Image (cartoon, rainbow, N blue to C red):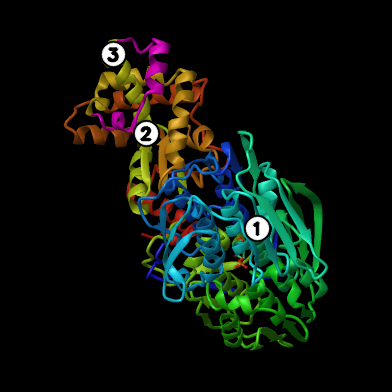
Amino acid sequence: MIHSPAPYPMRSSGATALKGDVSVPGDKSISHRALMLSSQVIGTTQINGLLEGEDVLNTAKALTALGVQLTRLSKQCWEVHGVGIGGLRESDHVLDLGNSGTSTRLLMGLVSPYPFTTFFTGDDSLRTRPMARVITPLTMMGARIVARGGNKLPLAVTGSADMLPIRYSLPVASAQVKSAVLLAALNTPATTTITEPQPTRDHTENMLRYFGFKLHSEKAEDGSVSVAIMGQQKIRPADHEIYVPGDPSSAAFLVVAALICRNSSIYIRNVCVNPLRAGLFKTLKEMGASIELRNERSIAGEDVADLVVSSSRLKAITVPAERAPSMIDEYPILAVAAAFAEGETVMHGLSELRVKESDRLSAIIESLEACGVTARAEGDTLYVTGCAEQPKGGVTIHTRYDHRIAMAFMVMGMATAQPVTVDDATAIQTSFPDFANLMNSIGADMVAVGATHVAATTHAPITIAIDGPAASGKGTLARRLAEYFDLEYLDTGSLYRAVGMKVVYAGKDPQDKSAALEAAKNIDAEDLANPRLRQERIGQAASVVSAFPEVREALLEFQRQFAASGKGAVLDGRDIGTVVCPDADFKFFVTATLYARAKRRHRELQGQGIEVVFESVLEDLRERDARDEKRSVAPLKPADDAIIIDSSAIDANNVFEKVSQIVLKKYPALAA
Ligand code: S3P
């Protein structure tokens, strides 16, 4: 994604007494690896809890372009049909990885052993980031890489079918570079060995082992770690299931918020606490934080736990350089915590922060100073002096399109004397799309400011389910929402009409269950645009075929796929929130009194030049309601968590206004 030119400012105001029992989205690093590695085994892998942030969606898009079939089964649940080692094909377009360094560097490794060319580019931030660190080892192995000046994106990787194994010592501790070489080594004969100066996150190794690959890791006395992998291993075809734990780098924002806001106590479930990612929690505990790990367990090679965090008085400490790889993404939020600690916190070994999504070292210092906190860097060491008094805040932070700077300073605003505004919160979509919402659910006060016209970002597809009785206005509402939010629209009633149409036009009786079932299995998008669907006799046939549970079941998959694919969808019908999309982001049940609906339908018919007496319309609707409610399969009723919209006394415009405001409150970035 070339990031949106329309910035999206957000303000975070003071908060106390945060409370809640929450989960954070799936781990970003593990999500990328789950998609990439499951493409390299023969079999189907179901990934549960996948992070649906822009970065991971960009990896998914790139893999699709490389010939891998990915299906979104439901919210955060994806299926990957592995092509096996050597099974990728050349992409016929440039891979745009948006803001994601992990996608770019790992995929460069993945495509290196293929004798075709792959072009890579990214957004303004990614195009400034150094790629020499991956270009060097991949070139040693045999890939040819042509990059823009300074080894930046855009670049092209022409892979080789004759890759050579290497022994490579990483000049910087980088899990991305290690993983890029490991992915290239997967399809390279003989043994490739990578040595890292300090251990970095080992999710690639853990997941490779989980899929059945053999590799050998060894820690030397000087603290360095070597990983050796033999390429082109024969892995037995098999189906797998992966559970992605919550991202500790996202949990970090909730943890620090709970520590610095008075009288808070929160419970965060299912967080990855792999020791190579848990440096922040260790550091905060040394600073006096009350963070308790509960239900510690291991899932597919990853340590997972629930966290209980309560407000704490923090004191400054010195964080050693060796710890940096285990908390490399957490320094912005640690620096915020340090601003509330007693004394000067010293953080060593931060040179890598200069080449993240922004120059984070400068961004942290500039933003802390703006908030009234003393901070400075000397070489690669950061010093932050905790405020004896509450930091003043009352500023707008320049986020440099960096998600972690944006989130860290939104958290800062929760405990400063005056609110903190970030100039652009769109980057948060890359890793934690629901951030503001989740924070508000535990007691934060984060709102969009002055954003009257915001270009839509690549958000995870959202689903809006709309149910309701006949003539409630649900169809009109659904169409308007789809148009306004640029979502796909499915009138699920038309599916049953399409089944009825196929049966009738095949000369069969709609009561013929097997004919109806056959038709339901063969519905495609074109059927839904057929003008015959509006015929009265087709409407009657639809009401017959829709009573067959088998037909409803057969149409489920079509509806779910529709909801999950593409840019997001609005579906209306009778059982959308209850049966078809129980995980929908929004469920509305639009209703009105029988009298109001009959009036509406009567007016509608008159508008079409159809003369009917009001009483017969009323009677007709009364009968349909009774049928809908009593139906044994999927009877018409609101889902337990549906928002009921009573449209008896308001017109279609008011209904739309009301519902669209609810959607925008949760996803302000959707503003048209
Ligand atoms: C990541 C590794 C780290 C980290 C990044 C994700 C990964 O980068 O900063 O957010 O998933 O491998 P480096 O490898 O550049 O340290």
Residue 178 image point, x, y percent: 63, 61
Q: Is residue 588 above or below residue 627?
A: below
Q: Amino acid at mark 3?
A: Ala
**Element marked by disc 1:** loop
Q: Looking at mark 1, is its residue's CB closer than 8 Å to ligand 1?
A: no
- Where does the magenta region start and end? 508-530
551 vs 620, left or right, is right
Q: Nearer the viewer, residue 411 or 193?
A: 193
Q: Amino acid at mark 2?
A: Tyr
State which mark lies toward you, 2 or 1. Answer: 1
Residue 524 image point, x, y percent: 34, 29
Mark 2 is surrounded, within 10 Å at the Cα level, by few (under 14), some (14 to 19) or many (20 or more) other residues, namely some
In three-dimensional space, the C-alpha distance between marks 2 and 3, rounded to whole angstroms, equals 39 Å
Inspect this view and state whether residue 365 appears.
yes
Quadrant position of the C terminus in the picture? bottom left
Q: Mark 2 or 1 closer to N-term? A: 1
Q: Nearer the viewer, residue 186 or 621?
A: 186
Q: Mark 2 or 3 closer to N-term? A: 3
In which image quadrant can residue 254 be found?
bottom right
State which mark lies toward you, 3 or 1. Answer: 1
In three-dimensional space, the C-alpha distance between marks 3 and 1, rounded to whole angstroms, equals 53 Å
Residue to which mark 3 is pinned: 506
Residue to which mark 1 is pinned: 247
Q: Which mark is residue 608?
A: none
Quadrant position of the N terminus in the picture? bottom left
Residue to which mark 2 is pinned: 595
**Element marked by disc 2:** helix
